[in-house]
Amino acid sequence: MSQVEEAHEQITEEKVHHRLALDLVEPGRDDMSEGRVNRHLPEGITSRLLYSDVVRLAWPSLLELTLTQLTSMADLMMVGGLGAWAITAVGLTTQPKFLLMTMFIAMNVGATAMVARYRGAGEPKKANEILRQALFLTFGLSLIASILGYVFSETMVRFMGAADPETLAGGTIYLKIQMIGLVPLALTSTFTATLRGVGHTRVAMYYNLTANLVNVVLNYVLINGHFGFPRLEVVGASLATIIGQVVAFIMALGVVLKGDHYLHLRFSEGFKIHKQHMRNIIQIGIPSMFEQLAMRAGMIVYARTVASLGTVVYATHQVAMNIQAMSFMTGQAFAVSATSLVGQSLGKKRPDMAQSYSNHTRRVGMIISLVLAAVFFFFGREVVSLYTDDPAIIEQGARILKLVAFVQPFQSSQFILAGALRGAGDTRATMAITFMTVMLVRPILAIVLINSFNWGLDGAWIALVTDQLLRSGLVLLRYNSGKWKKVRIK
């Protein structure tokens, strides 16, 4: 590296220095994770400072994820104007798409953990090497997934339970278009994951929100054909989504090329495989990949079981799932804080700070989850009516949202503590927990309650709530064991 480049790295390091309470404490020792962590905060560190760090990292992600989900909700509302078949067609593509995204999403978990560690250790050069390795890996995996997804789109939608030709045709073309835009989506997700790892959540918010705005505007003009554009229905909805994703990719690429946010992508340094870095990313990512595969397999069986109840019932289920996904945003946003802060703390060899950050993050998330629970419980009917005017869907959807309200606090804690475990690189534990709950408990219980007890959609959602409660308890047990503090990364 030239003297000019070294000077740039020093300036970049100074830009992020002392932004966190973590930067005010001395680096720890290798043996600090071996004993019991002191419950008292280090001298000069207050709860107010920790809460400030948590919220500073979480609010951009919360705003970004919330508006992204609102965009998804707007998609479904606009598509819903075409009829129940269109809601079902789009809904049936969700799990196949996420299944194909599993590989690079899992590797992003490894990239986030590694970048956070090197940020905490004050090693920007290694953090940027991780960025290049992660991009190389993501490009290859997403290209393969894109080709497979395009070729087998109709097969996957049919497998998901498309009950009529109109739903099958609509779902197939929607998924094919999504596969065309998968590579830029994947690369953007890697930029976002690594930027979050070093604590720069705000910049990711800007380009993702821009993509959402493009998506909503194009939805309006392309689904029903406004301002002289053709009426493309579900094709228009899918095109709007991938155009927005391409916009986000271009903006994210510009961010890392400029290099003002700790990470700086230089094409001149190439994308050769660095064996140790790649090994570390994969070592953390592989358990996460199996976790995602187990989750998607369980979700596919679960979705197929619900789809067997008919198009209108599945449309109700899809609306409820879409609303529940909104409630995920709080947990996921604060999980971003937990992942970044825990990873950076362990990189600095301060497991005491890692534990304090994760505990404070959990408390903030809990408060917000209780507010959401109240909204879903008392205003469920009004929320569901935003999607449809069908009385049957509104009535059953409002009843299901009471179950969603009940599970909110447990769900929030689960997301945040799982984020802390991933930030530490403890992905094997979350893999085992997900396999047990989503792969086994949820689909099996749903099949029994629907087919043997004839509880219909209510039975499916009781199975989902049971899964969430069990998963939350198991994640809490793993976190309380403290084993995550001893995970070593070279």
Image (cartoon, rainbow, N blue to C red):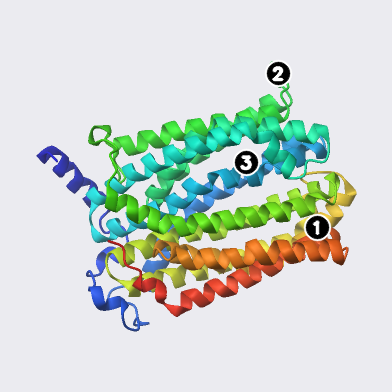
Q: In this image, 426 relative to 477: left or right?
A: left
Residue drawn at (80%, 55%) of the image: 397
**Image disc number at residue 398:** 1
Query: In terms of sequence position, does the residue under pointer 3 or pointer 2 come before the other?
Result: 3
* Among the two numbered marks 3 and 1 on one chain, the one whose residue lies closer to the N terminus: 3
Nearest the viewer among 99 and 367 is: 99
Residue corresponding to mark 2: 230
Residue drawn at (24%, 73%), measured in percent from left and top?
Answer: 30
Q: How many marks?
A: 3
At which x and y percent is residue 483? 41, 75
Vertical placement of residue 68 versus 36, above or below: above
The residue to which callout 3 is attached is 71
Instruction: Specify the farthest residue to the top.
Output: 228
Q: What element carries label 2?
A: loop
Q: How far apart are marks 3 and 2 (CA)?
A: 21 Å
Give left or right: position of 297 versus 415. Answer: right
Q: What residue type is labelled 1?
A: Ala
Label 1: element kind: helix
Q: In front here: 272 or 26?
A: 272
Q: Which residue is drawn at 31% across and 48% down?
A: 130
